[in-house]
Amino acid sequence: MDRNFIRESKQRELEIRRKIDEQKTIMKTITNEEDCVVDNFCMTLQRHSLSWGDYIACLDKVNQALLAGIPLREIIYNYLENKKCSSYGGENMMDYYVRAFNTEMLPIEKILACREKDIKIVDVNPIVPNKVVEVTFADGTKEKSVCREPDTFSLESAISICISKKIMGGSSAYNNAIKRGMKVYEKKLEFEKHQKEEQERIEKKRAKRLAYKERRTVKKREEQIAIQTEAYLRAMKAMDDSKNVVVNEENN
């Protein structure tokens, strides 16, 4: 009985560890942040989690927010701010944190939960021809799309933008999502630029090292030739001196 209990406990522990590692791997794959940033944030989440289940659920919430286009550093900032607020408001910090994800950060399941009936269009009104379009939905809400220079007007694109605003919860949430997406793209370009510069630096360092090794090899070869030449000359001189001694002895 004890052995079975120990074995089952180890299996549960391994399963928990597997789920945690899986969530961390997903997080590191989605974000461009360094592994140390992700690891430190995960350690902070773990310290303030009530259980392993809460910790895994929290990691999943973070990954959902990342998939929704929210940068990790913004998530960390919101987490720290929520932690600070909860310490003053008396609310359990983890409850506050999860509620923040559910209400303020718009996790991806909320987007997926928006069914076709919620975005049924009842009217499309071009307020300004080839520029501003207003779409009215079945629940009475209205969203607008404005075509700005140098974009080319498209009624289909305008309707799509209004649908996106409806799904996201309004123009403000939609624009914020666009800004986050641009930040993600800019960070991606910055990361790629950094990677390229780092690769160039490594290549230059490698080329410099190879050139140094080649110069050192040439120098050693020249030194070896000089040593061999000097040894050869000394040997020839010794032979000549030996011959001169023999000749002098014969003459005497």
Image (cartoon, rainbow, N blue to C red):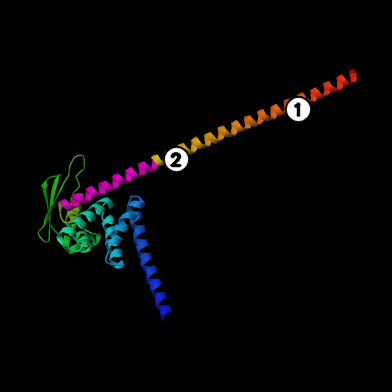
Residue 208: x and y in percent read 49, 35
* Badge 1 amino acid: Ala
The structure residue drawn at horizontal position 22% and vertical position 49%, both measured from the top left corner, is 178
Locate residue 20: give its quadrant: bottom left
Kind of residue sitting beneath label 2 = Ile
Q: Provide the major secondary structure of the magenta segment.
A: helix
Tell me if I can see residue 105 in this picture.
no
Residue 13 in percent (x, y) is at 38, 69
The residue that disc 2 covers is: 202
In the picture, the quarter occupied by the C terminus is: top right
Left or right for 134, reference 74 = left
Name the residue carrying label 1.
235
Question: In the rendered structure, which disc, 1 or 2, sits on the residue that comes first in sequence?
Answer: 2
Within 10 Å of the Cα at label 2, are there few (<14), some (14-19), or many (20+) other Cα atoms? Answer: few
In the rendered structure, are the residues bearing label 1 and label 2 in contact, judged by CB atoms less than 8 Å apart?
no
Q: CA distance from mark 1 to mark 2?
A: 49 Å
Residue ID at (55%, 36%): 213
x and y, in percent, of residue 83 in the image? 21, 57
**Mark 2 falls on what kind of element?**
helix
Q: Residue furthest bottom?
A: 1
The segment highlighted magenta reads: 172-196
Foreground residue, 34 or 1?
1
Specify the quadrant of the image occupied by residue 164. Answer: bottom left
